[in-house]
Image (cartoon, rainbow, N blue to C red):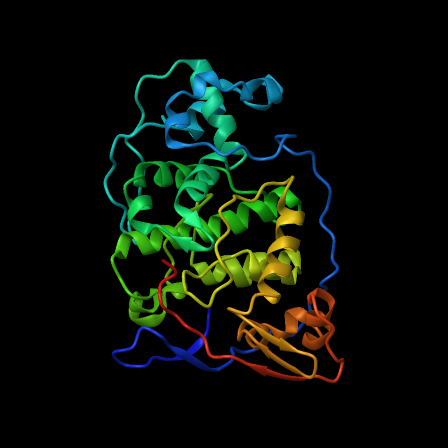
Amino acid sequence: MQFFVQACQNNSSITINNPPEKVEAQLDSESKFESEETLVNSDLDVVTSADAKILSEYKIADQVQQDEFSSSQTISQTSAIDNKEVTTINPSANWTSDDTGDKNEKEIEKEAILLSDHQLWNALLSKHVESGKVDYSGLKSELSKLNQYLEWLRDNPPSEGDKSRAALAYWMNAYNAFTVKLILDNYPLKSIMDIDRGKPWDTKWIQLGGATYSLNQIENEIIRPRFQEPRIHFAINCAAKSCPPLSNKAFTATNVETEMERLTKAFINSTEFNKLAENKIQLSSIFDWYAVDFGNVRQYIIRYADQPLSDKARVSFLSYDWSLNE
């Protein structure tokens, strides 16, 4: 996220005074995704740490045709899911997992299926995220699994210009997973704003498909212009208390639409982030910074609000708390 901020010294809560520069084109909130066959027909199953060690007992491979994963692809795209430690990754450095181990072809294929539908990321989220609060200490203890997922993201980006549901799920998961990685590499800390002199979103360190990106590039040069979907703002997380909460479920081609809708409605109606009254609407600064994405902000809120609101209600914006979302 690229924001104009004024940091309050000796205070982890930081107030945003000025919105960023607006983009030229108004995004269409009703745009649809191109259809695509999904990799997995079932909803995500919660995979615990113990489950990850006994993947052979899962019958996941029966849900996917064998020809979707050749042995050459799976060997290059996956490494073993176990509890071995790997070297902590510095954001500016190249990184790989040394967690290979001895795996037979069937085990490698099952691991590839888990990764291909973001199951490994889902397992970490379901275990370490509750009500939007992130257990960074717990995640750090499973850094090897996060690194393995980041490697899979690096090696399997969507094709350029892909606007499918699967592509959107990939990019939003990537944004969230690399944000978590950034926090873990600097943990403990009070705020993401403590990283890179308050501009962590501008640093290019994320390696995907042979290119290197910043978080800002993923959000503002890929997700927003390519998908033209305002609900993404409630699905990607910037690791701050005032950010829309990090979901404890990974996005997939099959759930991305319903999850975005659920997260949008939950955020708008949460008194933690917005204060809605019939004639007075106080909103998260997100609706100010990205107003061009939402079109008529008042009407957008009315559309999702659980309570009746006047179409002439006065709209104002709340300050933003950049304290870490733990």
Q: Residue at x 65, y 39 (%)?
A: 254
Instruction: Determine the image quadrant of residue 52.
Output: top left
Q: Nearer the viewer, residue 63 or 280?
A: 280
Q: Is residue 263 left or right of residue 99?
A: right
Image spot of residue 109 (x, y percent): 48, 20
**In the displayed structure, would residue 268 be above or below residue 280?**
above
Q: Which is nearer the eye, 324 or 274?
A: 274
Can I make out residue 74 in this image? yes
- The mark tally for this picture is 0
Viewer-closest of 15 and 227? 15
Q: Viewed as shown, does residue 244 lie left or right of 266?
A: left
Residue at 39% in and 70% down:
322
**In the rendered image, which quarter is residue 266 located in?**
bottom right
Name the residue: 73% across, 46% down. Answer: 34
Residue 310: image location, x then y, percent: 75, 80
On screen, 225 above or below 114? Answer: below
- Residue 163 makes an appearance in the image: no
Indicate the quadrant containing the C terminus: top left, top right, bottom left or bottom right.
bottom left
Q: Give the image quarter of residue 31.
A: bottom right
Q: Residue 320 in the image: x percent, y percent?
A: 45, 75
Residue 21 location in percent, x, y?
A: 54, 78
- Tell me the residue at 61%/34% (across/down): 43
